[in-house]
Amino acid sequence: MSTKLKRNISISYMYNFFLQLNITSAIWVLYLAFKGMSLVEIGMLESIYHITGLLLELPTGAFADLYGRKFSVVLGRVVSVISCIFMITSSSFWGFAISFILSCAAMNLNSGAAEALVYDSLKELGEEEKYKKIWGELAFVMSIAQGIAVLLGGILADIQFLYAYIFGMVIQIVALMISFNFSEPHIDNQKLKKDEAQKEKHNKKEKIIMNQLITSVNVLKDRKIVLYIIMFSELVGSLQTTVFFYSQQYFSDLSYSKTAIAIICAIGSLIEAVSSKYAYQFEKWLKIKGTLISTSAINILALVGLAFVKELSIMFFLLTSVTGGLAFTIFSDYINSRIPSEYRATILSFNSLCFSLFMICVFPLFGLLAEYTGFSISFGVIAILYIPVMIFLMLKLRKHKNKELKE
């Protein structure tokens, strides 16, 4: 069994590489604009994506805890391939909406399950202290894949958008084939099995999932510092994602070609890869408090720069990649080390749920502002809204960190 669990880690590198080899990530805004969608409609489609995440994230996390991380990951890849088909064949808002819904469902099925599969494999091997370093290396691999993907996507899109989307679907099929090689780690689910036996006569599966959700919420209530780290992490992630996607159109308006935009995004992914790989060393130097302050300050600087200094817009865009890599690795380890395995996938899904909540608010607001006021004002407004929320979360984290130390 230990050999299979060690193999899970090796497979994770390959699986996550192909998972993140999403060659449409740097062109989908341009693709939808090419298909006749306005910035407002693009913002609405992204909101539909994240509303879907809001509805499905926790149930899919509980699903992974109850029925297996591997099964959840494999099912996610199947749904992703179907989403690709809709994206290629659709030409209307609602056709794209179906594709976005399916794409989000695929992400939900994968998000908490894939991360929990890695952590619990290490935990069963008695090597969970290696997680931060391994997850940083995985983040490095994923960021490299993203960099290659956006470069390929930009080049193919300059030839024809359809080529990029067909190739993207083939890559998802490869990720699906790889996912079959995972082995399910053993999880002590005695509590869950006891609940299952008690509720067998009354809609057993639905009640077990609801019980899993309720218990996971209670775990977060008891560990408030985890709750606020999750919120902080996903706010950073939502800001970076909004900047990354809308910058496609922003740079296009500045007369950059699709290939040039792809090169800029690829460099951003490379920077994120390096910051992810060495995040554990950065955290040793600055600790969690310094990491929180640094990521906040860099993001604010980047947004202000994008708003007022167009001549240096590429540099400020790339700054957000630094914080993305740091937050992804450091906060993931911080969260995982403070939650029990039997509820890990559910709570990690709550992590993604928070990301969806922030994206539902930020992404369409940015699209609406950009449509009617331009990108510069939009970046400035988002920076102004970002500051008080960051201060609030850091104050909460300071309070509960002190409480945790006392306990």
Image (tube, rainbow, N blue to C red):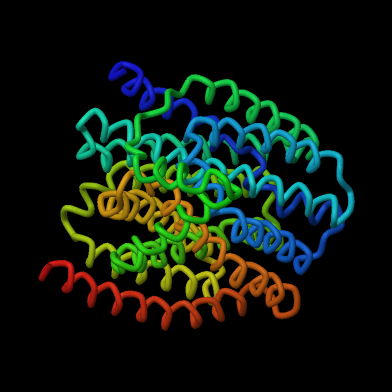
Q: Residue at x 71, y 75 (%)?
A: 368
Can residue 244 be seen in the rendering of this structure? yes
**Residue 114 in picture, x, y percent from top left:** 46, 38
Asked if 29 appears above or below 158 in the picture, the reply is: below
Asked if 249 appears above or below 4 in the picture, the reply is: below
The C terminus, quarter of image: bottom left
Asked if 63 appears above or below 53 in the picture, the reply is: above
Q: Residue at x 76, y 69 (%)?
A: 40
Q: Residue at x 49, y 77 (%)?
A: 383
The residue lying toward the viewer, choosing from 322 and 178, is 178
Q: Residue at x 61, y 45 (%)?
A: 262
Q: Is residue 393 left or right of residue 260?
A: left
Quadrant of residue 90 in the image?
Answer: top right
- The total of numbered circles placed on residues is 0
Asked if 156 appears above or below 227 in the picture, the reply is: above
**Residue 276 in picture, x, y percent from top left:** 35, 46
